[in-house]
Amino acid sequence: MLICTYFEVPQTDASTVAAMTIRTAEVLAGCTPVDYLAVGNPTLDVLPDSSFAIGGSMVYAVVQAARLGLSAAGVGRGCGVELAPLWTPFETEAFLYIQPSPDTTRFRNENIDNLRTQWLEKSAGAVSGLDRLAESRVLHLAPVAQEIVLDDIVRGSVRGLVGLTPQGLIRSWDDSRLVRHHALRIGNSTARNIDVVVFADYEAAYLTGVAEAVRRAGGIVVVTKGPRGAEVLLANGKQEFSAIATDHLVDDTGAGDVFAASLFIALDSGFTVSDAVRFATAAAALSIGGIGPRAIATRNAVVKLAGRDTAVEDSAVGVF
């Protein structure tokens, strides 16, 4: 069901995650705080049969947060009529706030000889009101196509941990809509407001400046490497972590976003970096066993695979 009107977010008790429905983003600023808030445009990903799958870092992140027991919300821009039918499987899990646009951001990918070529067929445009976001325990900056300005968010948000998945900030495109990548740099004042940044190894060449700035400011940098695990970079050194072996790979789309969301949540919950990476690795490994956000695992499944007691405490905002 599509609802694009001005409603307040209902209060949730410690055992309930509020139902998800598509609502206008402008109402978000005055609403009840949430545990996990992700900012970035949802996407329509074009499948080989020309049908669409819902995607985008924000989508994967809020579904994972909800399945880990948090009150979760995503904010972005898109076409509600296009998005609403694809949200149906997730409508009882989290909130989605959408600023109206004639189009939803749309990507088409081709894989040739293990190399991915990507086209941005449509763009929903920039997200506005980033200085008026609701309070959250975790704020996940999750752009896909240059739709956010980092400084606008970090200056105006009321939050605990700030995590960044910057892939959408290194993407650019030409008149043919072919996606290319460029280097991204951030200032020291912005870096001081980012607690954790996560990106893939194939993006690392474009994000050296971001990684160094966040490290110098005392933040955590995590580089994911697929089946080769992950590398954590801190101000005082680095450490490699192994992947969790799996023989059931169906679709690895969104695995990095699932990893990032789970990592941010674990770190905000007081895990050590090592335990948080293990927890996030388990979540990512489970997510590739199916197609799309439907395959994202629950907390119990993640805890079991991680092999640790990852129970977390109740928070003032919701339940972790």
Image (cartoon, rainbow, N blue to C red):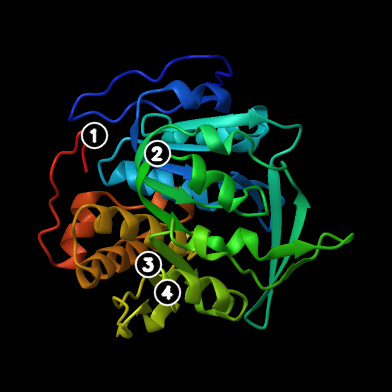
Pointer 2 residue: 158
Q: CA distance from mark 2 to mark 4?
A: 23 Å
The quarter of the picture where the C terminus appears is top left
Q: Which mark is residue 206?
A: none
Between residue 56 and residue 157, name the one nearer to us. Answer: 157
Between residue 197 and residue 252, name the one nearer to us. Answer: 197
Q: Amino acid at mark 1?
A: Gly
Q: Quick check: 160 left or right of 1?
A: left
- Write the residue at 51% across / 59% down: 189
- Up/down of 272 relative to 90, above or below: below
Decide: marks 2, 1 in contact (CB < 8 A)? no
Residue 46 image point, x, y percent: 68, 53
First-in-chain label (1 vs 3)? 3
Q: Which mark is residue 219?
A: 3
Q: Which mark is residue 318?
A: 1
- The answer to whether residue 173 shows anywhere in this view is yes
Pointer 4 residue: 216
Between residue 161 and residue 243, name the one nearer to us. Answer: 161
- Write the residue at 32% across / 85% down: 237
Q: Amino acid at mark 2?
A: Val
Residue 310 image point, x, y percent: 14, 57
